[in-house]
Amino acid sequence: MALLEVQNIHGGYGDNTILNGVNIEVMENEMVAIIGPNGAGKSTVMRAVMGMLNIHSGKIVYAGEDITNLPTSEIVKQDISYVPQVANIFTDMSIYDNLLMGGFLNSESANKKALQRVFDFFPDLAQKSKTLAGNLSGGQRQMLAIGRALMLTPKLILLDEPTAGLSPKYMKQIFTILDTIKKQKIAVLLVEQHAKQALGYADRGYILTLGKNRHEGDSDYLLNDPEILKVFLGG
Ligand SMILES: Nc1ncnc2c1ncn2[C@@H]1O[C@H](COP(=O)(O)OP(=O)(O)OP(=O)(O)O)[C@@H](O)[C@H]1O
Ligand SMILES: [Mg+2]
């Protein structure tokens, strides 16, 4: 059974329709990449899953339950964490306080455990836990944003362009962390501009254009189709 099923959703902002029939599945413990040109609706799909969009038709099913148009506050209780493309940390708070905010639904003892887990993932954050998040580098901010999302011990994590603007070194570090997250039995749905690299780590991928599925399949298939390679993966 799929953990997450996005079934033929149509929807958008107000009356403005952006998604015109998107279908996405994420199995338990799977890493899935969504790629496609700017404006294709990739971030909008993630917002739809998180209950931040008007869905006119279609369904979103999580762990067998219909979560379509549930309020975001209910969706975060379903073991789904979301790292948005922008504004994903509180810059005027310390690393430590950002992480505590991420664990707002936890009991105190669960928070302690979660903090330890996140600091094991990101030793750099542990060393600097009193530092203001606004003083971190781009790569460190992304690690903090992912760390925050891990505070709730999710079964599924949605990451919108976690490597945007990062140096190749930080990019590789983030992808390695995603691989580790997957090995801990957390499913990952990832939006990425670095399409080839993302498919190198993901099990499967979806290519969206104009708010619709365009291509989908195993990463190996997408990476080896000459037409897809040329048009969507930068040759
Ligand atoms: N808050 C909003 N209100 C109205 N329209 C929006 C809003 N956010 C995005 N859109 C529109 O929805 C369409 C899809 O945007 P979206 O952010 O989902 O694209 P994307 O595939 O994530 O692009 P990018 O690669 O640039 O991040 C765009 O035409 C955009 O202008
Ligand atoms: Mg986007």
Image: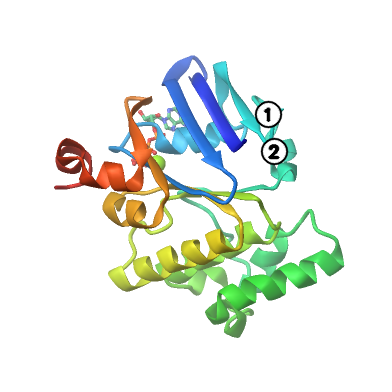
Q: Is residue 80 left or right of residue 182?
A: right
Residue type for callout 2: Ile
Task: Indicate left or right for 131 with 42 as reference.
Answer: right
Is residue 213 among the parts visible in the rendering?
yes
- Quarter occupied by residue 60: top right
CA gap between label 2 and label 1 equals 7 Å
The amino acid marked with disc number 1 is Ile
- The location of residue 121, given as percent across then percent down, is 58, 73
Q: Residue at image x 67%, y 53%? A: 154
Q: Residues within 10 Å of mark 1 (few under 14, many from 20)?
A: many
Residue 139: x %, y % from top left: 42, 68
Residue 227 x, y percent position in the rendering:
16, 36
Measured as percent of width and height from the top left, residue 4 is found at: 59, 36
Is disc 1 placed on a helix, strand or loop? loop
| Residue that numbered label 1 is attached to | 67
Residue under label 2, please give it.
Answer: 75
Are dots 2 and 1 in contact, CB under 8 Å? Answer: yes
**In the picture, which quadrant includes the N terminus?**
top right
Please tell me which residue lies in front, 33 or 75. 33
Q: Is residue 183 above or below residue 193?
A: below
Residue at point 73% right, 39% down? 73
Q: Is residue 227 above or below residue 172?
A: above
Toward the viewer: 75 or 232? 232
